[in-house]
């Protein structure tokens, strides 16, 4: 019988990808995706553990789901609740104890086993079926090849986990050690996505540019090589990757940006701080000058390269001077966009145990200052596009009637009249207005 599955996704793009794959895994059991949680037969929340705020949301969401489950039970409907993602990985037992109405807890490396886990649910047990293993088998070998079309721009996971152990970060603990998917597995999925109508692939990994694995020739390939091979696939028009670490931005990869036209001129390259002292304490293993050199080389390889970043303010021991160094780095790099966060102490990480934590109000003040600077840079970057013609990949109807929405090569959202082109087309549009987070374009002139 047809059943409805609703997945609510928090956190990074890797979770967005994983949520799609969970839907693929459950499709053979009769589940189809539904945007509506209220009439679902199963709800999965795919969670994020990166900052405390994100993790806290899980328990408030679970409180709401409990009421829903009880109300449905009164109507004679047995609905299922599953928790996936990094909070599931880090706090599996705790979730089951604090929220015994949860049926399944599944970690990011075990979700290919969802059918088995769902089959093992015992409604009388009042405890979840938990699977937070890092299995020896590769989940990608067990995920179904069949998947629902992902739209013109699709995510493709190529690498997971992290060995770098930045002292603030939980990822090495929740996602485990670095693992790269073999090239043949990546290329096969890429071909299937293209056959399903995707023209842009965005390669995902916690350390995507650390990707290194066996190539189709049996030799070890690096990430640049994988990009060249993917760019050669028929029907692929755009290629992106995220998130990269400065340490793995090698000369081959920078050259790929000069060589491969499909590789879009936008790179998310987090630096976290502009202070050498803080970078060292974070265990980033590079200096601010190393970062500047990489940016300069990227821009020499491709002059229209736009950079985006992540920043943490208020890392333990961060002084006014350290923060001034961060602002100065931002001024020098000139970002097209940036994500910034107050440092959030995470359980088990070295930085959380330091006794020189920064006051909350100092963090708030620094965050506001930093965000003001990057917002101004982003707006200037967007405004500089006014009057330009650019290629836009049409991705979806826009929220406003009679409009469509797409993306520029630089990842900017572009809105334009719906008469221009079809979803999946790349069209040339003239930018007529620019806003903080998007561009407006006019219709294509008809001859
Ligand atoms: N506190 C605040 N921000 C963090 N990030 C990772 N860990 C923390 C933390 N403990 C940020 C980093 C990273 C992004 C995904 O989240 O900037 O690049
Ligand atoms: Fe976390 Fe650092 Fe690994 Fe990124 S590189 S996932 S910030 S430990």
Image: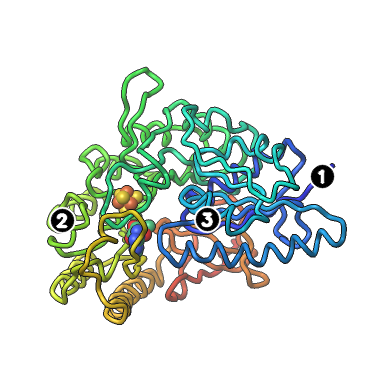
Pointer 3 local density, CA inside 10 Å: few below 14, some 14–19, many at least 20: many
Residue 308 seen in the current view: no
Q: CA distance from mark 2 to mark 3?
A: 30 Å
Residue 352 x, y percent position in the rendering: 29, 61
Is tag 2's residue or tag 1's residue first in the polypeptide sequence? 1
* Front of the two marks 3 and 1: 3
Q: Which quadrant holds residue 379?
A: bottom left
From the viewer's perspective, tell me whether residue 70 is left or right of residue 277: right
Picture layout, residue 222 above or below residue 37: above
The crowding category of the residue bearing disc 1, from other C-alpha atoms within 10 Å (few below 14, some 14 to 19, many at least 20), is few
Report whether 7 appears left or right of 88. Answer: right
Q: Residue at position x 48%, y 61% from top?
A: 55
Check the picture and name the quadrant holding the C terminus: bottom right
Give the quadrant of residue 370: bottom left
Residue depicted at x 61% and y 31%: 145
Q: Considering the numbered disc 3 on the image, is that residue within a helix, a strand or a loop? A: strand
Give the residue number, with chain letter if any, for mark 1.
Answer: 2
Q: Which residue is mark 3?
A: 47
Q: Is mark 1 within 8 Å of ligand 1?
A: no
Query: Which tag, 2 or 3, sits closer to the chain's start?
Result: 3
Q: Residue furthest right?
A: 76
Residue 264 in the image, given as x and y percentages of width and height: 38, 50
Q: Residue furthest top?
A: 218
Residue located at (69% from left, 62% from top): 66
Q: Position of residue 411 (x, y in %)?
A: 43, 59
C-alpha distance separating marks 2 and 1: 54 Å
- Where is 268 relative to 358, above or below? above
Residue 280 - label: 2
């Amino acid at each position: 019988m047809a059943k409805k599955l609703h997945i609510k996704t928090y956190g990074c793009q890797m979770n967005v990808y994983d949520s799609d794959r969970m839907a693929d895994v459950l499709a053979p059991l009769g589940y189809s995706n539904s945007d509506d949680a209220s009439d679902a037969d199963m709800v999965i929340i795919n969670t994020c553990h990166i900052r405390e705020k994100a993790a806290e949301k899980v328990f408030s969401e679970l409180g709401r789901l409990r009421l829903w489950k009880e109300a449905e039970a009164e109507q004679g409907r047995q609905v299922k609740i599953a928790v996936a993602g990094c909070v599931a990985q880090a706090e599996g037992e705790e979730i089951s104890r604090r929220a015994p109405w949860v049926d399944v807890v599944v970690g990011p490396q075990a979700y290919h086993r969802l059918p088995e886990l769902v089959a093992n649910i015992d409604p009388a047990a009042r405890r979840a079926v938990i699977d937070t293993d890092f299995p020896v088998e590769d989940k990608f070998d067990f995920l179904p090849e069949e998947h629902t079309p992902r739209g013109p721009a699709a995510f493709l996971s190529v690498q997971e986990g992290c060995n770098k152990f930045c002292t603030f970060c939980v990822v090495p603990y929740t996602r485990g050690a670095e693992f790269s998917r073999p090239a043949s597995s990546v290329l096969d999925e890429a071909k299937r996505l293209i056959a399903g109508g995707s023209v842009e692939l965005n390669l995902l990994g916690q350390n995507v540019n650390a990707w290194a694995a066996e190539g189709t020739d049996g030799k070890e390939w690096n990430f640049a090589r994988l990009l060249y091979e993917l760019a050669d696939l028929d029907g692929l028009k755009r290629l992106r990757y995220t998130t990269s670490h400065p340490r793995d931005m090698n000369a081959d990869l920078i050259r790929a940006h000069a060589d491969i036209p499909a590789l879009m001129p936008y790179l998310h390259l987090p630096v976290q701080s502009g202070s050498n002292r803080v970078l060292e304490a974070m265990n980033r293993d590079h200096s601010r000058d190393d970062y500047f050199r990489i940016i300069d080389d990227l821009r020499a390889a491709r002059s229209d390269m736009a950079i985006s970043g992540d920043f943490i303010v208020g890392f333990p021991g961060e002084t006014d001077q350290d923060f001034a160094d961060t602002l100065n780095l931002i001024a020098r790099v000139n970002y097209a966009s940036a994500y910034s966060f107050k440092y959030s102490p995470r359980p088990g990480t070295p930085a959380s145990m330091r006794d020189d934590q920064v006051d909350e109000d100092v963090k708030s003040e620094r965050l506001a200052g930093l965000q003001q600077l990057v917002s101004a840079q982003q707006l200037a970057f967007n405004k500089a596009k006014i009057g330009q013609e650019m290629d836009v990949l049409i991705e979806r109807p826009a929220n406003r009637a009679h409009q469509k929405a797409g993306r520029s090569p630089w990842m900017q959202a572009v809105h334009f009249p719906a008469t221009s082109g079809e979803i999946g087309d790349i069209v040339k549009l003239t930018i007529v207005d620019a806003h903080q987070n998007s561009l407006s374009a006019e219709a294509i002139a008809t001859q």
